[in-house]
Image (cartoon, rainbow, N blue to C red):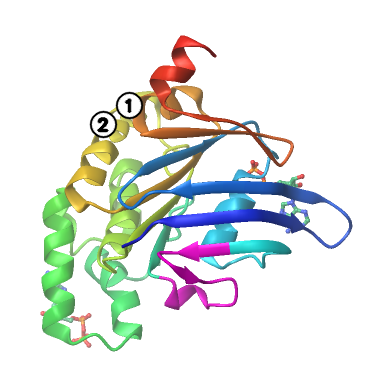
């Protein structure tokens, strides 16, 4: 079970910026939720708090029915995909995908099983021996997704994962991510400033402005009465 519940969450940065204010949201298990809004509205901060990369100033965060405010990122059953793929340049695709599991002392045959399966899902089996510099932008993005998939998390956090891709590839990856969400059967929380991405991918859209939630609704309802 991997619902995500945010109760009256606030983030106040040192220096006086309140990046997120009174954020309340119940994300269902297996739901695909999109946080959308202009640059600086608090999307990234919200995602980073869910990941445990940023401390919560006030409020309660639950993953499943567990209060996780003070739980370390590695113990949260989540995986995060960033917009700058952050691949290790000296490692092959296989090693990039295996690295996190190796750190966790996952047995070698289990690592191989998971990497092979993720590579099959993402259609990058033929790239496993390459270094990142020998990959296209879209291929790099797949490897970044692969690194998250091999961890088999219950919740995926995606921070503008497509914004470094050209328009054509972005459109293609939108469709693929929607399929991936269904195939994995996990909760997706996805941050973007791109309205089209928001309207075409999620089950529900959370519109943010100046750190507050402005609207929460299905794409259809937002489209009918924006
Ligand atoms: P978004 O992801 O919607 O672009 P962010 O969550 O990155 O927004 O930022 C929200 C607000 O918090 C902005 O005003 C930003 O300048 C501020 N902010 C973000 N990170 C920090 C930080 N580490 N220290 C201080 N202020 C920050
Ligand atoms: P080590 O260097 O400690 O042996 P590696 O991470 O290089 O560890 O490899 C771990 C396992 O993954 C090995 O059993 C290897 O056969 C397998 N492996 C490494 N690269 C690939 C690849 N491109 N395709 C399939 N299996 C691989």
Left or right of residue 124: residue 44: right
Left or right of residue 70: residue 170: left
Residue drawn at the location 50% of the way across and 73% of the way down: 73
Left or right of residue 166: residue 41: right
Asked if one can make out residue 185 in the rendered structure from this viewpoint, the answer is yes
Report the residue marked by disc 1.
171
Q: Quadrant of the N terminus?
A: bottom left
Nearer the observer, 40 or 2: 2
Residue drawn at the location 37% of the way across and 70% of the way down: 90
Left or right of residue 8: residue 111: left
Q: Is residue 39 above or below residue 86?
A: above
State how far apart marks 2 and 1 are (Cα): 7 Å
Magenta segment includes 71: yes
Callout 1 crowding tier (Cα within 10 Å): few <14, some 14–19, many ≥20:
some
Asked if one can make out residue 89 in the rendered structure from this viewpoint, the answer is no
Magenta segment includes 67: yes
Tag 1's secondary structure? helix
Report the residue marked by disc 2.
175
Nearer the observer, 130 or 112: 112
Residue drawn at the location 59% of the way across and 61% of the way down: 49
What x and y, as percent, mark residue 173? 30, 35
Pointer 2 and pointer 1: residues touching (CB < 8 Å)? yes
Residue drawn at the location 60% of the way across and 52% of the way down: 46
In the image, which is nearer the foreground, mark 2 or mark 1? 2
> What span is colored magenta in the figure?
61-76
């Amino acid at each position: 079970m991997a619902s995500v519940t945010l109760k009256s969450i606030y983030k106040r940065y040192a220096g006086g910026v309140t990046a997120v204010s009174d954020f309340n949201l119940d994300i269902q298990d297996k739901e695909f939720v999109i946080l959308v809004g202009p640059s600086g509205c608090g999307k990234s901060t919200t995602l980073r708090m869910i990941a445990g990369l940023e401390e919560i100033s006030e409020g309660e965060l639950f993953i499943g029915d567990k209060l996780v405010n003070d739980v370390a990122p590695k113990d949260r059953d989540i995986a995060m995909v960033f917009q700058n793929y952050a691949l290790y340049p000296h490692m092959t695709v296989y090693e990039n995908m295996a690295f996190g599991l190796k750190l966790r002392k996952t047995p070698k045959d289990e690592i191989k099983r998971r990497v092979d399966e993720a590579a099959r899902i993402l259609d990058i089996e033929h790239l496993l021996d390459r270094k990142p510099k020998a990959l296209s932008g879209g291929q790099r993005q797949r490897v970044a997704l692969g690194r998250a998939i091999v961890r088999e998390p219950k919740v995926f956090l995606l921070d503008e994962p497509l914004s470094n891709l050209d328009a054509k590839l972005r459109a293609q990856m939108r469709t693929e991510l929607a399929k991936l969400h269904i195939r994995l059967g996990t909760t997706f929380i996805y941050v973007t400033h791109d309205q089209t991405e928001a309207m075409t991918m999620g089950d529900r859209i959370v519109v943010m402005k100046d750190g507050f939630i402005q609207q929460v609704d299905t794409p259809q309802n937002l489209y009918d009465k924006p």
